[in-house]
C-alpha cells in the first residue's frame, strides 16, 4: 500500500511585487515514513525558496488512490462509500474510501471517478467532493513499471 503524507511548509516567499511574505502551504508526498516525508518535502522545496523554511506539520493521509493529470490544475478530495451486504444479517455495510483527484472542476472529478470505478463490481456512492488546499503532489519515481 502506498503511504501519502500531507506536509505543511512555512517559508519566505517573494511575491510578484518583490515583497517578501511568510506563507504556509500544503503538499502531498509519497513516502514510507514521517521522517522520509519531511526529508522529501524539504528536498523538493529547497530550490524554490530563500530565507526561513520549516516543515510545520506532517500528517498521514489515507488515500486509496491519487489520480494525477498535469493538464488539470486543481486537486479535490473525494469520499466514496462502498456498499456491501452482510450475508449473515442481510444488513447493509458502508465502508469509506478516499481519493485525491486532479481535475478542472467538479464535473471532471465525477467523470474521472466514474472511469476509475467502471470495472468495480461493488456498489458505491460518491459522498463528498471538495477542493483541496494541497498545491502539488510529489510521488516516488523509482517504482518498477
Image (cartoon, rainbow, N blue to C red):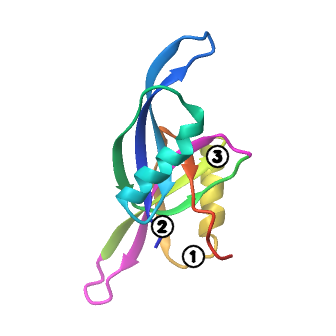
Residue behind mark 2: 124
Residue behind mark 1: 120
* 6 in magenta: no
Between the C-alphas of marks 2 and 3, the distance is: 21 Å
Query: Could you tell me which residue is drawn at 54 percent across and 40 percent down?
Result: 45
- Mark 1 lies on a secondary structure that is loop
Residue behind mark 3: 103
Which label's residue is closer to the chain start, 2 or 3?
3
In the rendered structure, which segment of residues is drawn in magenta? 71-91
> Which mark is in front, 3 or 1?
3
Q: Is residue 135 left or right of residue 92?
A: right
Is disc 2 in contact with disc 1, using a CB cutoff of under 8 Å? yes
Residue lying farthest to the left in this orientation: 89
Residue lying farthest to the front in this orientation: 51
Residue 121 figure quarter: bottom right
Q: Is residue 21 visible?
A: yes
Amino acid at each position: 500500500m502506498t503511504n501519502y503524507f500531507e506536509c505543511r511548509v512555512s517559508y519566505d516567499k517573494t511575491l510578484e511585487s518583490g515583497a517578501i511574505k511568510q506563507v504556509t502551504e500544503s503538499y502531498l508526498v509519497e513516502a514510507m515514513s514521517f521522517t522520509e516525508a519531511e526529508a522529501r518535502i524539504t528536498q523538493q522545496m529547497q530550490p524554490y525558496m530563500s530565507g526561513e523554511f520549516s516543515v510545520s506539520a506532517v500528517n498521514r493521509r489515507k488515500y486509496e488512490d491519487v489520480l494525477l493529470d498535469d493538464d488539470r490544475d486543481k486537486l479535490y478530495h473525494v469520499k466514496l462509500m462502498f456498499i456491501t451486504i452482510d450475508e449473515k444479517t442481510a444488513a447493509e455495510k458502508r465502508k469509506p474510501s478516499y481519493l485525491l483527484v486532479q481535475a478542472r472542476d467538479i464535473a471532471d472529478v465525477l467523470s474521472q471517478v466514474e472511469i476509475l470505478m467502471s470495472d468495480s463490481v461493488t456498489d458505491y456512492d460518491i459522498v463528498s467532493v471538495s477542493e483541496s488546499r494541497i498545491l502539488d503532489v510529489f510521488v516516488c519515481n523509482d517504482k518498477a513499471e
